[in-house]
Image: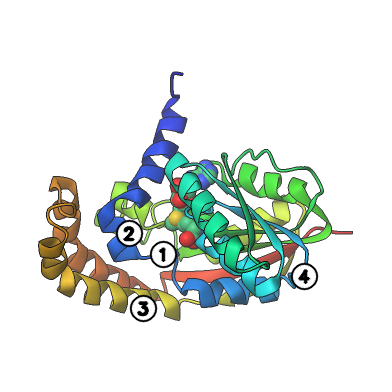
Amino acid sequence: MALTDEAYAKACCADLYQSPWARQILGDPLHPGGLALTNRLGRLMDIAENDWVADLASARGTSAMAISRAFHCRVVGVEFGAGPVAEAHAIAAAQSENNANSRGYFLRGDAESTPLATGRFDGVICECSMSLFADKPAAVADAARALRPGGRLGLSDFTVTPGTLPAELQGSVGQILCLAQALDVNGYAKLMETAGLKLTHQEDASEHVLKILDGVDAKLAALPILQQISGGAFGGPDDNEMIRQAPGLVARIRELVAAGELGYWLFVGEKPS
Ligand SMILES: C[S@@+](CC[C@H](N)C(=O)[O-])C[C@H]1O[C@@H](n2cnc3c(N)ncnc32)[C@H](O)[C@@H]1O
């Protein structure tokens, strides 16, 4: 099957998150605030027992499984990358053997046009991924389509004031860090409203960006040991280039957060009944 440029870009993006350095440095789940912020989003969305929740861009299913365990709901993850979907299947099967409340189902798909059933979902979450999507209005419209009346979309993502991102955070590095195509706070709120959702909550969680940067600094300091014990599995030419740039990028991101130009926010929108 021939790949369109757009599909190629999405597949490359999915592959980037699978690279050893991305896993080591960015961690899992792949967003600021970790699972505590995922659960915060779930509480703001009022997710209830036995609800059906979709997780757009679910990667290895870490957030989806956590939401399922915390709220005793069923979660369908949609992810573009074939590798992470296969991993999510395996992790979900292992977890559901030990915990009956852990109910996650995963499928490969494009968040901009999902195969999710119309009007079927009580909630849709999308963490640190809307910023990556080329067609954000299509993704939010598709989520709104999948929600039942009264259902809620919970978004968490990087925010960037237009025109403030320095050159070194644009392009592929800015893309993998969810910054290159991020919107400002009003941009996400407007996306929801344009899709017919009523914005019920927005919350600044930017302090978690600083915490994740502290974690990245600590991991970078530990890298030489990691490279030694990984026996070469970690540290190809692309990895090394990324690692060389990392301390400077971390410092730039800190400056932008301090200046209020870059942040991380939660948004909840409700589909009118
Ligand atoms: C920064 S990671 C976030 C993953 C997860 N939501 C989390 O918070 O841990 C972005 C994920 O979005 C996926 N992705 C990017 N574009 C996508 C699309 N159009 N449809 C579905 N998944 C996509 C990538 O493959 C990657 O797994």
User: Tag 3's secondary structure?
Assistant: helix
- Mark 1, ligand 1, within 8 Å: the answer is yes
Instruction: Give the amino acid type for the residue marked by disc 4 in the picture.
Output: Glu
User: Reading the chain from its start, which is encountered first: label 3 or label 2?
Assistant: 2
- Left-right relation of 172 to 99: left
Q: Nearer the viewer, residue 37 or 262?
A: 37
Of the two numbered discs 3 and 2 in the rendering, the one whose residue sits closer to the viewer: 2
User: Reading the chain from its start, which is encountered first: label 4 or label 3?
Assistant: 4
**Residue at the image position 64 percent from the left and 74 percent from the top:** 70
Pointer 3 with pointer 2, Cβ within 8 A: no
Query: Where residue 119 sits in the image (x, y, percent)?
Result: 82, 48
User: Reading the chain from its start, which is encountered first: label 2 or label 4?
Assistant: 2
Query: Where residue 187 sits in the image (x, y, percent)?
Result: 57, 58
Taking the image as drawn, is residue 133 in sight? no
Q: Label 2: which residue? A: 23
Pointer 1 with pointer 2, Cβ within 8 A: yes
Q: Label 4: which residue? A: 49
Query: Where residue 21 sits in the image (x, y, percent)?
Result: 25, 57
Q: Label 1: which residue? A: 28
Q: Is residue 85 positioned above or below 41 on the image?
A: above
Q: Nearer the viewer, residue 122 or 166?
A: 122
User: Tag 4's secondary structure?
Assistant: loop
Q: Quadrant of the C terminus?
A: bottom right
Q: Label 3: which residue? A: 210
**Residue found farthest to the top:** 1
Mark 2 crowd level (few <14, some 14–19, many ≥20, 10 Å Cα): some
